[in-house]
Amino acid sequence: MSGDVSDEALALMDIAALAPLIAGSEVSPVDVMQSQLARIEALNPDLNAYVSLYPEAALAAAKEAEAEIAAGRYRGPLHGIPMAVKDLFQVAGMERTCGSRILAEGVANSDATSVARLREAGAIMLGLLSLHEFAFGPTGINPIVGTARNPWNTDRVCGGSSSGSGCATAAHLAMATLGSDTGGSIRIPAALCGVVGLKQTYGLASRAGIYPLCESLDHGGPLARTVRDAALVLDAIAGVDEADPSTAGARVADYTALLGQPLEGLRIGVPRDFFFDRLHPDVEAAVQAALVVLDGLGAVVEEVVLPFTREASQGWNVMAMGEAHTVHGTHLQNNAADLSPDVNQRLRLGEGLSATDYILARQTQARVRREMAGVLERTPILAMPTAVIPSVPIDTGEIMVGDKSVIGWKVLGKLTRLACFTGQPAISIPCGFTQDGLPIGLQLLGPWFEEPLLLQVADAYEQATEWHQRRPPLAV
Amino acid sequence: MSGDVSDEALALMDIAALAPLIAGSEVSPVDVMQSQLARIEALNPDLNAYVSLYPEAALAAAKEAEAEIAAGRYRGPLHGIPMAVKDLFQVAGMERTCGSRILAEGVANSDATSVARLREAGAIMLGLLSLHEFAFGPTGINPIVGTARNPWNTDRVCGGSSSGSGCATAAHLAMATLGSDTGGSIRIPAALCGVVGLKQTYGLASRAGIYPLCESLDHGGPLARTVRDAALVLDAIAGVDEADPSTAGARVADYTALLGQPLEGLRIGVPRDFFFDRLHPDVEAAVQAALVVLDGLGAVVEEVVLPFTREASQGWNVMAMGEAHTVHGTHLQNNAADLSPDVNQRLRLGEGLSATDYILARQTQARVRREMAGVLERTPILAMPTAVIPSVPIDTGEIMVGDKSVIGWKVLGKLTRLACFTGQPAISIPCGFTQDGLPIGLQLLGPWFEEPLLLQVADAYEQATEWHQRRPPLAV
């Protein structure tokens, strides 16, 4: 027992609820960590969220946090909070694999910038979370380090590439996590696992120490159980970092500043033309209901047309394949047989691209950004599904939508690439469940560096609904 | 006669000297224009600086300027000044060719942004100046629209690609001109024709309305007879332009602000390792003497090492060839036979480049920029020759350096690409003549957006020497 909260319940709490108890020494970070580790021990063998776990170091850090707080040196809402990051981040004292057998980096002796900033804020690192190999795929199926299983149905994928981050956050195996997102890799697992996933503006948070996939499209950001918790993590990681030149123009804000403000009169655009025509009916119904909720909160929900989504998708594809091949070309050359078959195949797509293909894709990116900026002038927030389908079975990788079989990896990123291509912020929040109990995500996009507004809208929706309070059916 | 200045002498004056006379109505813009047109009529048939000339429109504009000034509406130092631009710029009422027979654009109905800004400042456009076809070559040899001839020796090239801009400025066929510079195309003709050529910081002046060659490397900037005149032109053209997103971060200054300030203690770095090993001996001697002058002005001249020049040159090559092919690929496909043979060949170099080649070159660019920034922290100004050789004969394209024959187009850009790759500002100023009377240019590089400092150093050198006062041996 720790104060008035049972040990088991500690691991189930939100950061925002737990933090004041830690701050007031009503709850000890050591008890929180023990509760957290016990839950991981019980559930991770089935869920496979963690590739590697460092319980002794985590417990030692919890004791340090306890001592610091007892000495009056409370750091803020992340102090003593157990967190974990995708096995793509450098964490001092941990051994990164990137979900691959090709790298043999050994134990890292420094932190990725975002990890260092979380630790400065007092967060404690539990370990490294599963992912699609090299973060290059949307399902999280990984024959090398094992596939993380969806807490809502362990026969299903978590979505990827930050599969373990989605899994651990949903199953309360960490209070919040970091993932990375090049085409949807934070938002897809957030949607499929029923948690919040935020891809902040390109250039707002450092990628230094995150193994690159596509320099122009990569983002590292939070998955959490509430919008407020995601905002607290963003507060810690946002800001200029000399080690990542893309952050040179970062415009930082207080990310909880607008939470709780009314949405009255805010215009929200719904680009129906962009929704894939084979939208799963349960996804369609849940998103439609979510729009009604937003309307009820005073927002002005209206149709918008995004005439550039097809060229954005093609442009993303060329840039992503070209840049991924640039990073992993030597792996393809020297270690092809060691790669997951789908990653091997995906990497080959970049081989045949010409400089002109790539240059034209960058020109498309610049044009799409300008056109998106025009759209956001009228409707600063755009609402749509995060993914066109819910999670798919791990063994087949596909599900029926109506009378057609749909292959997960082909469609899961359809609606998330756009915000990576434009660089604008995007968030996935829980908005319902399929008839067979799988989570569904609502995706909101906002203007560059206006995360406070985006989080305000997401939080207002969350406060008006109860989806985020449901817990996956897991027996400890 | 116009006031106390003879009509012939008007065309020979610097802008800075002429402007107060125009401002005070001692000299009429109409007389200036008549003097200018008479000189063009006399000399252009031999020199071939102009591809097209619009004397009636220029004279009408001069009358308008005269009336405006008489009515008390003097606009500033460019008011009533005859100028001309490279035939790569859109000028309303003029027909652009880009030195090619492929385009058939007809008469333009709007100005390039920089032309519009010059006209707002009161400058008058005479016509469009010769160039290497599509600005894609360093000699200015152009079998399509004719080759501009060097005013110092009409058997020689002007250097390119802004050959006509160098020619017209040197021969006083315009008081100042605009050129464009992707790898040296302003500075090389400035050096070979004995005038000042300034390539300002990437993103400081708009390229909107300049036919693109390589989006990431293109700059449009001034050629003038003095540093101060170049600063006056930059004053007019610098600044953010929505039509050219690269200018979004433009940091504008007063470009004559520091002229005349002493150089005492300023560190100037000399990267001798970077000088091509077949430097023409007269170039070497002139640059060496220039360094002595700078030292005499109080600057601290010291050796620096630029360990990145080879990879910068290779990276520039990949980016330039890839981007040029992206712009002109369809011309190559549909109109190969209409292209100058060397441009045809050069464009083909971009065909075989892969996306990964290009992406790696961009990464090199980012790294070289950071390393250059480190060098400039100690020595904010770098000094070197503009070109390793003086002008070459038009017919052979090559000259002897010692006992070796050197091919002009292969070496003329050796020392100028670097500043296009880094995007930092660079200027070429006259620093002497070869034994056979051909001009030699001193190149100075400075920190990004610190044109006031760069111009200060160039002006101090110019004031201490008389090279810029010599006039080519032309008989009107």
Image: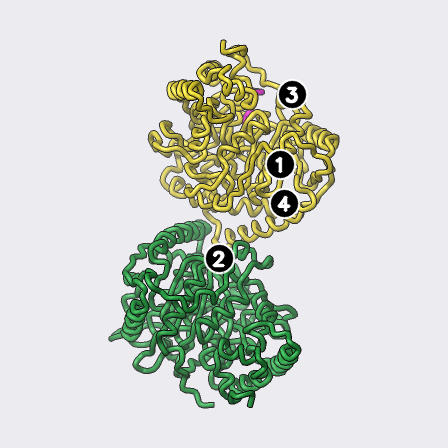
Chain colours: A yellow, B green
Report which residue position mark 1 lands on: A454
Check if mark 4 and mark 2 are on a common chain: no
Kind of element beneath mark 4: helix
Please report, as a chain letter, where disc 3 is located. A
Kind of element beneath mark 2: loop
Report which residue position mark 4 lands on: A309
- How crowded pointer 4 is (Cα within 10 Å; few <14, some 14-19, many 20+) is rated as some
Check if mark 1 and mark 2 are on a common chain: no
- Mark 1 near mark 3, Cβ–Cβ under 8 Å? no
Check if mark 3 and mark 4 are on a common chain: yes
Is residue B27 located in the magenta-colored stretch of the structure? no
Rendering coords of residue A405 (x, y %): 63, 31
- How crowded pointer 3 is (Cα within 10 Å; few <14, some 14-19, many 20+) is rated as few
Distance from label 1 to label 3 (Cα)? Answer: 30 Å
Say which of marks 2 and 3 sits in front. 2
- Mark 1 near mark 2, Cβ–Cβ under 8 Å? no
Distance from label 4 to label 2 (Cα)? Answer: 25 Å
Dot 3 amino acid type: Asp
Distance from label 3 to label 4 (Cα)? Answer: 31 Å
Give B355 or B428, whichever is nearer the viewer: B428
Please report, as a chain letter, where disc 4 is located. A
Dot 2 amino acid type: Ser
Report which residue position mark 2 lands on: B216
